[in-house]
Amino acid sequence: MLKTHTMGASAAKEEEPEPGDLIEIFRGRYQHWAVYIGGGYIVHLVSNSEIHSLGVSSTVLGGSVSGQVKKEKLKDVVNKDDWKISNIHDNKWDPRPKQEIVKEALSMVGKDMEYSVTELNCEHFATERRYGKALSLQVLKAAEAVVRVGAATILDSTASGDMSSSPSVQYSP
């Protein structure tokens, strides 16, 4: 199991990330992802229109917004949030060589990009650097939750005999 780090006094005793590692930062309702490049720095994709009071990106409201790839100190990005080294797909895919991961991440610093919660978020960005595949488990989990809620709603309306909220299908021979 991976240890969760804090930026408090105990952080120095925890396992240190290596260049190319994925860093998962816990922000309450969502996780922010970055690529560790060494020397205490990360490279990550951020939305330029974050709604800080809600703690979520404005792209949750739909569509995409402008974003930018930044190089920053891990401790400054994490602030007081918990974080962990999270190379979550190493058991499925071989990570690219560390030097390639870091070189590609650094080559993107300062680049303006479209940011979309569902299609290109910080987790997509980080996993693409490490594995060459852009994937966001947060998006997949959210989609699964929507499907479960939709299925439960249909089952409830079917069980109660109220089909008014179910889609109607007409058959004509």
Image (cartoon, helix red, strand yellow):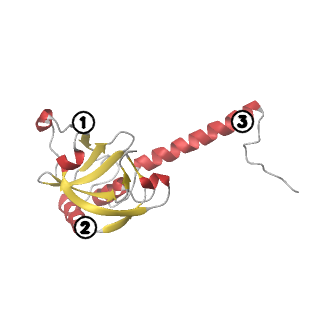
What residue occupies the far front of the structure in this picture?
53
How far separated are the C-alphas under marks 2 and 1? 29 Å
Instruction: Look at the numbered disc 3 and give the secondary structure of its residue.
Output: helix
Quarter of the image where the N terminus is located = top left
How far separated are the C-alphas under marks 3 and 2? 51 Å
Instruction: Look at the numbered disc 2 and give the secondary structure of its residue.
Output: loop
Q: Which residue is mark 1?
A: 4
Image point (58%, 39%), residue name = 149
Mark with earlier residue (2, 1): 1
Nearer the observer, disc 2 or disc 1? 2
Q: Residue type at mark 1?
A: Thr
Vertical comparison of 122 with 53: above or below: below
Q: How many marks?
A: 3
Q: Residue type at mark 2?
A: Gly
Vertical comparison of 92 with 110: above or below: above
Counting from the top left corner in percent of width and height, residue 53 is at 37, 45
Q: Residues within 10 Å of mark 1 (few under 14, many from 20)?
A: some
Q: Which residue is mark 3?
A: 157
State left or right for residue 158 relative to residue 64.
Answer: right
Image point (63%, 40%), residue name = 151
Vertical comparison of 38 with 111: above or below: above
Q: Which mark is residue 110?
A: 2
Vertical comparison of 166 with 129: above or below: above
Q: Residue type at mark 3?
A: Ser
Mark with earlier residue (3, 1): 1
Instruction: Look at the numbered disc 1 and give the secondary structure of its residue.
Output: loop
State left or right for residue 71 relative to residue 119.
Answer: left
How far separated are the C-alphas under marks 3 and 1? 43 Å
